Image (cartoon, rainbow, N blue to C red):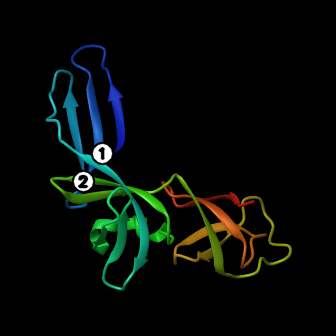
Amino acid sequence: KVTEYSHSKPGRGKATIRVRVRDLRTGVNKEVTFSSGDRVEDVRLDKSTFQYLYDDGTFYVFMDQSTYDQTPFTKESVGEARLFLKENMEVEVLFWNNRPINIDLPSFVELEVTKCDPGVKGDTASGATKPATLETGAVVNVPLFIKEGDKLRIDTRTGEYVDRAK
């Protein structure tokens, strides 16, 4: 999975593309450089819609929306997505050779704040934030006016606070 890329075209010579990639099978990040004309092997990937059901302590259990089969996923295969998984949430699961390799969450999720220290009056310098723990266990930085019980919209791609949910 490409996480970053940059394209450069010097005055003379071939253009190059430098990409930072994450191996979805192993989770290893590395940097690769391609020059114009390089070929990349195509990989056959399948995508299915699953619904997250629950975490039994060892596995995260998902249900295939088309067949209603329940499938357990290991902590490693779920990865960082587990920080924003909420029961009954629909996700896209990417398969390679019938093996799950990536879980795509919706871009934004609404989660409730379960633990948050009160903002200190007078501590309102621009951009002041404090940590808040969400119902899934994720910790995000939020503005000082956020309190326990508030529902927040979180960007799952960056893990950052967006705004309060309506």
> In the displayed structure, would residue 61 be above or below residue 50?
below
Badge 2: residue crowd in 10 Å (few <14, some 14–19, many ≥20): some
Q: Secondary structure at mark 1?
A: strand
Q: Is residue 16 visible?
A: yes
Q: Which mark is residue 20?
A: 1
Which residue is located at x 30 percent, y 67 percent?
69
Identify residue type, mark 1. Arg
Pinpoint residue 158: horizontal percent, then vertical percent: 50, 56
User: What's the residue at 14%, 35% (across, down)?
Assistant: 41
| Quarter of the rendering occupied by the C terminus | bottom right
Q: Nearer the viewer, residue 87 or 20?
A: 87
Task: Tell me residue 34's x, y (percent).
Answer: 20, 32
Where residue 20 appears, x then y in whole percent? 30, 45
Kindly report the distance in space between the C-alpha atoms of the residues bearing marks 2 and 1: 21 Å
State the residue in front, 150 or 130. 150
* Residue, far top: 12
Per the rendering, the mark at residue 95 is: 2
